[in-house]
Image (cartoon, rainbow, N blue to C red):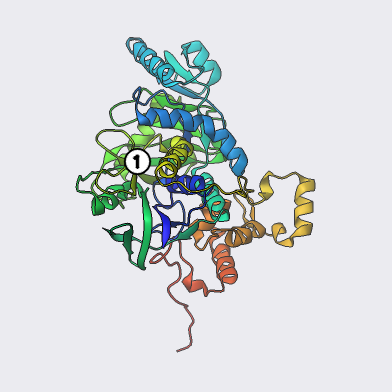
Amino acid sequence: MYDIVVIGAGVIGCSIARELSRYNYHILVLDKNSDLCEGTSKANSGIVHAGYDAKQGSLMAKMNVLGNQLMPKLCEDLDVSFVNNGSLVLCFDKTQIECLEELKQRGISNGVKGLEILTKEEVLLKEPHLNHNVVAALYAPSGGIVCPFELTIALGENACSNGVTFQFNSEVIDIKKQELSYLIKTKTGDIKTSIVINAAGVHSDDIHNFVEQDKIKVIPRKGEYCLLDKECQNLVSHTIFQLPNEYGKGILVTPTVHGNIILGPTAVDIDDKENHQTTKQGLFEVLSKAGLSLIDVPTKQIITSFTGVRAHREAHEFLIEEAEHAAGFFDVAGIESPGLASSPAIGQYVANMVTTKYPTSKKENFISKRKRIPTLSELSFDEQTKLIKENPLYANIVCRCEMVSEGEIVEAIHRPLGATTVDGIKRRTRAGMGRCQAGFCLPKTIQILARELNKDISEITKTGEGSYYITGYNKEDI
């Protein structure tokens, strides 16, 4: 019997779990996938939005602005890459400058600091590779970027270090309200809990509708992206938006904390919540609309494309509340952009809701900090030498594109909530994220996983059950 079960191990579920791990609750995080960060959190822009876009007075605006303020300290505590690079919203028509002014005023009302309208000359001084047809831009100095996998994994690891249990490959198929508890039925067995927190992303409506007579609907909104090689890292330094429309903030161009450039996303409402396919039409839209912001889009430097699916609600507002007809069941639904930026604030907000209604004592020994895996490529020569003397596995480079060593991969496997799949290694170490997209390092990564997990290489998967790389041996004895 658990005190609290959090459904969903994305950035929102992990943020909530970490905040609740400050208290003496018995907490379980459930996820249908094989690892943390396999839903919306794995495929987004990594933007820490300033908070000027959300409707004034909305919960989305409140969570965005507070989350933006909390993010730098959170990333410092959890040793997560964060860059306060600022953002620009471009305007290409003088008649639309008033739209920039509206955004600015909305941002000021939301509590965003430092907003200003820049002239064409000021914009091009900051970003010389932008399309010279730009006439003005809204500058938000508080905008930033973060690695979404790093953040989610760090939150999960820290929650785990504070006593939270995680259970993967456990899809919820039904929830039964009992007199003083809930019975959660999963594909791997039944779980009993006093409190349920629904942070299931695009499936949060399914989870809600198991227990609540007032149904909700989440619309899967598909977004396609292109990722450019690190050779393009000087293309832009700020996050570049175009004026937003009814489907969101449009096609952006932004650096990542690791030195790549991301273009995207599109915004297409779909029926299939598991549709992560890229399309010719979608990628064409990404490149053509990115071309409105840039002088030239370096299409030859695209190293991969990918798709994310966001949890959109028609109200375009976060739903964070205890269900009206199901006491102890808390919805955290419709968390689309700016969900990543809002995640620290949402974690605190939900923890406050739960502890206010179902109080318990605080832990005296809460662990607030976490250290990342030592990253060989970021160390000085002397630091590398010292690390290799301590652990010779750091001298063996497995991923040449990203300079990831065997030592990093082995540590990723044996940390709290360690990697068990190739994608799990990829998100924790960046092995396979470089120019060749695992063309050279994949076989070695599979071998290391098999060795460290004491499995046959045929058992190693990309991302859990059904995604096997090896189906047999080509010279088996007959």
Is 5 in front, or is 364? 364
Left or right: where does residue 158 sit relative to residue 332? right
Residue lying furthest bottom: 478
Q: Quadrant of residue 93?
A: top left
Q: Is residue 228 left or right of residue 388?
A: left
Q: Is residue 411 above or below residue 143?
A: below
Does residue 349 appear to the left or right of 244 in the view shown? right
Q: Nearer the viewer, residue 1 or 72?
A: 1
| Amino acid at circle 1 | Gly
Q: In percent of the image, x 55 and y 16: which residue is there?
A: 125
**How many other residues sit within 10 Å of disc 1, few (<14), some (14-19) or many (≥20)?**
many
Identify the secondary structure beneath mark 1: strand
Rendered-image quadrant of the N terminus: bottom left
Residue 77, placed above or below residue 200: above
Q: Position of residue 433 (x, y in %)?
A: 53, 50
- The residue beneath circle 1 is 223
Residue 233 in view of the camera: no
Give 407 or 183, whichever is nearer the viewer: 183
Residue 127: percent from the left, percent from the top? 52, 21
For the C terminus, the image quarter is bottom left
Q: Residue at x 37, y 12 (%)?
A: 97
Q: Position of residue 10 (x, y in %)?
A: 43, 49
Residue drawn 36% across and 10% down? Answer: 94
| Residue situated in front as seen by the camera: 64 or 436 | 64
Q: Is residue 378 at least partly visible in the picture?
A: yes
| Numbered circles on residues, count | 1
**Residue 36: percent from the left, percent from the top?**
46, 54
